[in-house]
Image: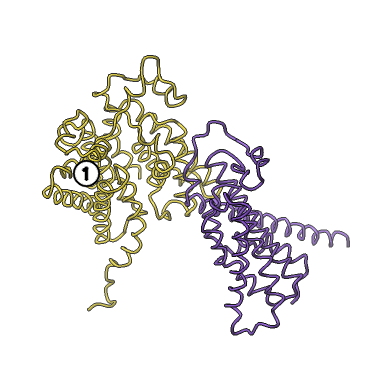
Amino acid sequence: MEKSYHDINREGLWTNNVALVQVLGLCPLLAVTATTVNGLGLGIATTLTLVLSSLIVSLIRNLVKPEVRIPIFVMIIAAVVTAIELSMNAYFHELYMILGIFVPLIVTNCAILGRAEAFASKTTPDKAVLDALMMGLGFTAVLVVLGAMREIIGQGTLLADAHLMFGEVGRMLTITLIEDYRGFLLAMLPPGAFIGLGLLIALKNIIDIQKKKKATKEVAIESQLVPANL
Amino acid sequence: MLQVAYALIPGILIFSWLFGWGVIINILLASVTALTTEALMLRLRQRPVKIFLSDGSALVTALLLGLALPPLAPWWLILLGTAFAIIFAKHIYGGLGFNPFNPAMIGYVMLLISFPLEMTRWPAPLSLSDAHLTLSQSFAYVFSGHLPAGIRLDALTMATPLDALKTNLGLNQTIQEITTRPIFGSIAGTGWQWLNIAFLAGGLWLIHKKIISWHVPAAMLGSLALISLLFYIINPATYSSPLFHLFSGAAILGAFFIATDPVSCATTPKGRIYFGIGVGILTYVIRNWGGYPDAIAFAVLLMNMAAPTIDHFTRPQVFGHGGK
């Protein structure tokens, strides 16, 4: 079954979100989201990896024999990640130092191999790239929101250390929301990430349930209207 | 559950007699927060509020947390800890009867990890400090952080016996040198020993009333005493006596009131003995070689985690099934 572009967008961003629904790539998600900027940095790196590897996988999909596809996918992803890692080291050195091992570890992010295997290897490059982009943006959005949550609760700021990413202008982006905040260490520690992600998933489920309720209500109202018109 | 609260009364009275109004303020704040949060969560989860609120479990959580936190702690600390305990340790898992961990201890550990400074600032026993706060002064300090003129924070606070022991052992002093300080008293700390005796009385009353079984407290205190006796015999200069371990910190409170929580403890009699031994040994290990002076909360939480496994292996044989 061919998916439309619209379906791909919706799935990547919401209904099949990497972090909230597939719950893949948890290791970096939980480890680096102590601040918004860290989350954004890793999110962009992951999105880039996803897009490039999906594009290549999709382009060579007719050449690869199914028996050896996994090692080939992994090698493509590893090559892309190495290139991104080196360029991050060159242009965003400080951020690269903070993210540390989690940049090379993008290779093992199962979301990327998952998309290559489940989608990119079976479809045309345009759809593969769009899917990768949307999945990556969905993942990045969760990273940023979780990072913002933890940063606000943990140290009372938003976009701290933004200069690591946006250069010197970034220093002005940092917002101190709570003056003289004592800090809430739990939010910065791994348990805070688990609790925060749990809350985000719960929030998504609540929104979905509300949407469903609204939809069924509308259907119910319409079906009531029909006999009235008769 | 309410009888557990009654059994805590002697301990609460002695505690506030020894440490002043801060204890009562702690307990009041914790109780109000716990009951409010419990009611809110029950409404949110569409459960009957009245029935669940009157079972007293939220109140017991609040009392235990109020007793575990340092008296005169700032108000937000108590609010945050109690609300976290009720929401995240209890209701997220499905409410009373479903929580794998002891809610009061989750609240305590969360605070200890997040706010080490506030959580380790214990007031001195009144008999050892020159500055005493009246009820209104205590309230003012808890809510605004302002001390009345002429009283400095240093005059009010003092390291607890366990804390003093840990710090000074780190400075290569022997137990005999350390325990000459006034905070140590005759057995296990001025004031602290009487507090623990009051908790012991309450706990024994609970066993007498058959609210809790003897297995957990006996196993926990027994193993704590045995292991500390063993190390005390080997080297009394660096390991303190079994009596000190039993009657300082939260050992007695933990043994009778915290580790015996019927929900998060092991359920079979044999399992409860293993559970108690585990808590006792872990307490000793963390107290001596861990980073924190007292360890009841961590020990209980770790054994909570092990409780389902313990239950699995100590299941009593059902008549007519299996057998050798």
At x 17%, y 38%, the residue is B175
Nearer the observer, B66 or A116? A116
Position above or below: A229 against B122: below
Residue A161's x, y, as percent? 59, 43
Residue A200's x, y, as percent? 59, 53
At x 31%, y 42%, the residue is B3
Q: Residue furthest left?
A: B233
Judged left or right of residue A28, residue B240 is left
Tell me the quarter of the image containing the C terminus of chain B. bottom left
Judged left or right of residue B183, residue B98 is right
At x 34%, y 64%, the residue is B309
Nearer the observer, A227 or B154? B154
At x 31%, y 59%, the residue is B267
Residue B200's x, y, as percent? 22, 41
Which chain can be seen in purple?
Answer: A
Image quadrant of residue B152?
top left
Picture colour for chain B: yellow
Tell me the quarter of the image containing the N terminus of chain B. top left
Image quadrant of residue A78?
bottom right
Residue annotated with mark 1: B204
At label 1, the amino acid type is Leu
Residue B276's x, y, as percent? 25, 54
Dot 1: what SS? helix
